[in-house]
Amino acid sequence: MYLRELNQSITMLRGAGPAMSEKLARLGIYSVSDLLLHYPRDYDDRSVFIGLDASLAGGRANTVVEVLSHDWFGFGRMRTLRIMVRDSLGGTEAALLCFNRPFLEQALPVGCRAVVTGKFQFRRGELQSSAFETERLVEGQATPQGVLPLYPATEGLQVGHIRKLVREALREFGSRVEDELPPFLIGRRGLLHKREALQGIHHPEAAGELLAARESLIYEELFYFQLAVARRSLIRKRNTVRRNPSRGALRNRLLERLPFALTADQKTAAAEIVADMALPHPMGRLLQGDVGSGKTLVAFLACLEAIEAGGQAALMAPTELLARQHAQTAARLLEPLGIRLAFLSGNVEDAARPPLLAALKAGDVDLVLGTHALFQDEVEYRSLRLAVVDEQHRFGVLQRLALGRKGPLPDLLMMTATPIPRTLALTVFGDLSVSTIRTMPPGRKPIETHLARTGNERKVYDYVRRLLEAGRQAYFVYPLIGASERSPAATGAELKNAEAMFEKLAKEIYPDFRVGIIHSRLKEDEKRATMDSFARGEIDLLVATSVVEVGVDVPNAAAMVVEHAERFGLAALHQLRGRVGRGLEQSYCFLVYAEALTEDGKARLKAMLATTDGFLLAEEDLRIRGPGELTGTIQSGSLRLTIADPARDLAILEKAREDAFAIVEKDPGLLAEEHRNIREVLARANPFGDAPVGKG
């Protein structure tokens, strides 16, 4: 029986009555399987007893105490339980201050014995602790020793209660748990059998056993995740596509018209994509490159390849602003080649919509650019051969799949200007090939980044004035649109907002310059008109929110000022900085920050100051935010991770990936006898929402 098949109700365990079950339900624990998958959050080594007085040297107490008395202090709902205890090691007395834990009055009655673990200090003339854990000892029970698991708990449910239930579950059901990995993998990777790993993770006798148990369970989860990735890749390669040959004539004509040569990385990426598009199965490729590295041009070359082969191409962007930017670039570069273009978004007028949809269906449009409107039910294509998704992380998986279903197995090219850390490349995008553009177009100067504390922003304003007087343009970006907004993380002083600062910048600071404003509440035609005016040089200074993070290309813009920069994520700051430096002149990014900075805020600003390399910043962003966000991305799919963390467990992930891909390549249908239990896991427990590929 596999662990996830232990669907017996938690009430079958001794000590799990109706009241206990109700508390366990708050933790998502309903079955024996849920309980055994409720892994410890930490461990406490209690192999050595330390008395209450000895803990004052800076360590944690770990001792058996007798409960002497209960009393309460405070008034009304603010009353707090105070439990006096006596240490059995030296007779020292201390107070346990039970803030928000009134249930301990019943759990630790006067006269009982209990193990207390925690930090104590002298305050108000007595030894006391408010950060402690207790486990009551019943008559005749041995004192808990060794490495004890600490579980996530909830109100009215102590860690000790969970610990006892897990012991009971392991005693009753542990021996029935089967391995979910084949024996040859367990042996090759030096893993524990599943029942041994469960025992070791919940009740390790030593640190070595705990480490082996963790690695075994982590490997198992990541192996099945990578197995699903490998099989998705296999399914794509098994779908046969009829290709019409392309001589690359359209691509060559575009390259001849360009006033510059492609960078080495652009050439390599374009060649990889063209090679994929010649294969007999649909392409699945991720094109990543830093801000301004020339990804869009490479995508246009791919579109020309699809069009010359007799198909259509669609390029989807997350915002109308970015989609229109792409449409304008396409009109400049591709229309002279005879490419028939169309633009489609939710804001296309009703009168223009039917003829546009009819042209798409009839094949009278070669390349359509737009927003999520491209995959709506009413949109039909004559022969969609290539779907390009820009800033792919802003679209859901289902949205991307919906666009892919608009044609007979179209090629898929996803683009991102937020470089993908290796961990993410192996997990969320593990079934895609990756092309990378690292080099920037020649002649561009690195953007100078400067930090300024709030209160010193006048120096920034003065520097920007000199740039404006020299005929350059600037952005001023704020975290909020108007005064009515409140940042969820805001504390203390009010945050500046775009609407108020637009008035101040236009009337007080730069009255002799033309100032515009753009944010998400404006109508699309207003945003478009403002951006067009800024691009034509009719606006000198553009006040904005993060709506300008993507899709804005104004080579004359020389300054990006981000006020309250600590309120923006590292990826957003890097994208905003990338809005300048798109011409040949020197450009600048000024990050104005509040004095009260969190440690993460400091780390983000230091990273921005240290490098303009988006790949380095992506890795730093993952380090600062921690692996939780990455895990959340993976959790949004069919796999629910319970103990593995791909960012933290990268080394194990790579081993699991190597093994999973090798198995699928050797035995696509998992028909070999040595793969029998993998096949059974997918068929019986099916924890990963994945069906067998079929005979290979």
Image: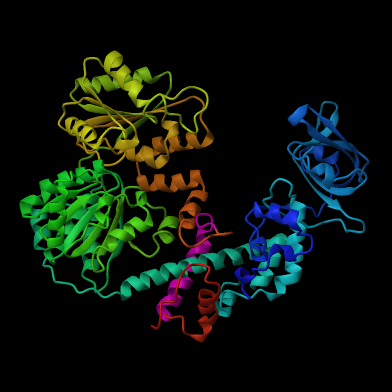
Left or right, 172 with respect to 470, comes to: right
Whether residue 284 appears in this view of the structure is yes
Q: Find residue 314 and report its image quarter.
A: bottom left
Give the camera-side residue of 584 and 403: 403
Whether residue 50 appears in this view of the structure is no
Left or right, 145 with respect to 265, comes to: right
Q: Find residue 212 and report its image quarter.
A: bottom right
Left or right, 596 with respect to 190, comes to: left
Q: Find residue 542 and report its image quarter.
A: top left
Q: Magenta segment range?
A: 645-668
Q: What residue is shown at x 76% (from left), y 40% (from top)? A: 101
Find residue 390 and report its horizontal and vertical position in percent: 28, 51
The N terminus sits in image quarter = bottom right
Find residue 511 and report its horizontal and vertical position in percent: 24, 15
Q: What residue is shown at x 48% (from left), y 85% (from top)? A: 672
Residue placed furthest toward the bottom: 673
Judge whether 106 appears above or below 430 on screen: above
Secondary structure of the magenta portion, mostly?
helix
Is 339 one of the magenta-colored residues?
no
Number of disc labels: 0
Find residue 552 and report its horizontal and vertical position in percent: 24, 38
Is 660 one of the magenta-colored residues?
yes
Give the camera-side residue of 635 and 203: 635
Q: What residue is shown at x 50% (from left), y 69% (from top)? A: 224
Judge whether 385 appears above or below 182 on screen: above
Find residue 598 and report its horizontal and vertical position in percent: 52, 33
The C terminus sits in image quarter = bottom left
Give the camera-side residue of 294 and 103: 103
Task: Report the coloring of the rendering.
Answer: rainbow
Judge whether 573 appears above or below 419 on screen: above
